[in-house]
Image (cartoon, rainbow, N blue to C red):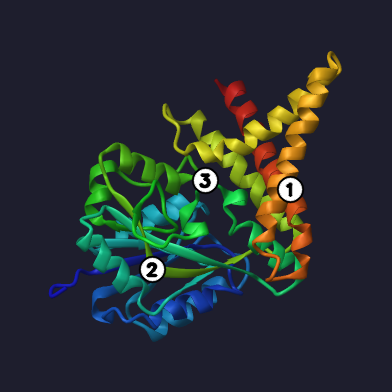
Amino acid sequence: MRNLPIVSVIIPCRNEELWIGRCIDSVVNTDYPKELLELFIVDGLSTDNTVEIAQEYAIKYSFIKVLKNGKHIFPSAVNLAYNNSTGDVIIILGAHATYELNYISKCVKYLFELDADNVGGVLNTVGLNESAIGTAITNVLSSSFGVGNSTFRTGSDKIIEVDTVFGGCYRRSVFERIGNFNENLVSTSDMDFNTRLKRSGGKIYLVPEIIATYYTRSTFPKFMKNNFRNGYWAIYPMRFLDYIPVSLRHFIPLFFLTGILGGILLSFFSIIFLYILISTLALYFIASVVASLKFLKQSRFSVILPFLFLLLHLSYGLGSLFGLVKVFLHK
């Protein structure tokens, strides 16, 4: 591409002292021309050394700016940086990830080649450590049985149109057309933004050549807490919106959990419902075992994957159920 655009890269963060350095390094080492790059590190009032680390980079590199996000949350960080940016292309990156040398140049290339409004790539998900639990959690979050048709997690062998991507590389005109990120939505503002983009006729593409490495949680408590939070924010945004900002796959854990709870309750009235419940759980177990076989060669600890699949779906579903109750109470 002869006339490359100015690219504004936004990295929202809070308490990421262990990861922000390697994330910034991966952007600093990009092959995209630095004179056409501006990098915003937007800190949500961290209580660790995140800001100090980011400021050291800002002193060293003139294209890096550190902003203070007094509202803490992700959507306000994106909006703050966008309002201070000058780029014709806006790329949003996660602080818990690192990016390939050609990540930005590939994003820009395909954004214009595909005449897209947003492009993104696939996530190479790895654990924060190489423990048995960390490896197993990584496998679960890379499995279509675990996360459904979340293609940026499970991967693709060709360029496809999708409903959302990790981070996202947008034309600036998208923000001008559909507005900024919704600051009422703490955790699903990106999915809502992409939903609004699709509803306006926009195109979002996943490109396998665009690769990021994402470092996932590697302990049971953090795994469960994150799943519950994701499930909650898949449903709770309906309190603020008159449309559904997520796809069908985000509701499946809620259907699964309520089906189990309903089956248990109805089994007190008829043994038929008990048989249905047992049959359903048996089919689920068989499916989870089959999904686990894919990872058998990677680790002998893959035998615990069916248990982790169940924890993932139940904790996510419980968060969604809690969010649904709060929406009904508010309505």
Residue 281: x percent and y percent? 76, 37
Q: Which residue is mark 1?
A: 311
Q: Secondary structure at mark 3?
A: loop
Viewer-side residue, 329 vs 207: 207
Q: Which residue is mark 3?
A: 186
Viewer-side residue, 109 vs 77: 109
Alpha-carbon neighbours of circle 3 within 10 Å: few (<14), some, or many (≥20)? some
The alpha-carbon separation of the residues under discs 3 and 1 comes to 23 Å
For residue 131, side relative to residue 217 (left or right): right
Query: How many labels sit on residues?
Result: 3
Identify the amino acid type marked 2.
Ile
Which residue sits furthest left?
Answer: 2
Q: Secondary structure at mark 2?
A: strand
Depicted 78 relative to depicted 126: above or below:
above
Viewer-side residue, 154 vs 177: 154
The alpha-carbon separation of the residues under discs 2 and 1 comes to 31 Å
Residue 113: x percent and y percent? 20, 62
Residue 207: x percent and y percent? 36, 62
Viewer-side residue, 242 vs 260: 260
Please tell me in which quadrant of the rendered image residue 100 appears. bottom left
Query: Which is more N-terminal, label 1 or label 2?
Result: 2
Q: Residue at x 26, y 52 (%)?
A: 117
Please tell me in which quadrant of the rendered image residue 130 appears. bottom right
Alpha-carbon neighbours of circle 1 within 10 Å: few (<14), some, or many (≥20)? some
For residue 25, side relative to residue 256 (left or right): left
Identify the amino acid type marked 3.
Val
The alpha-carbon separation of the residues under discs 3 and 2 comes to 26 Å
Q: Which residue is mark 2?
A: 210
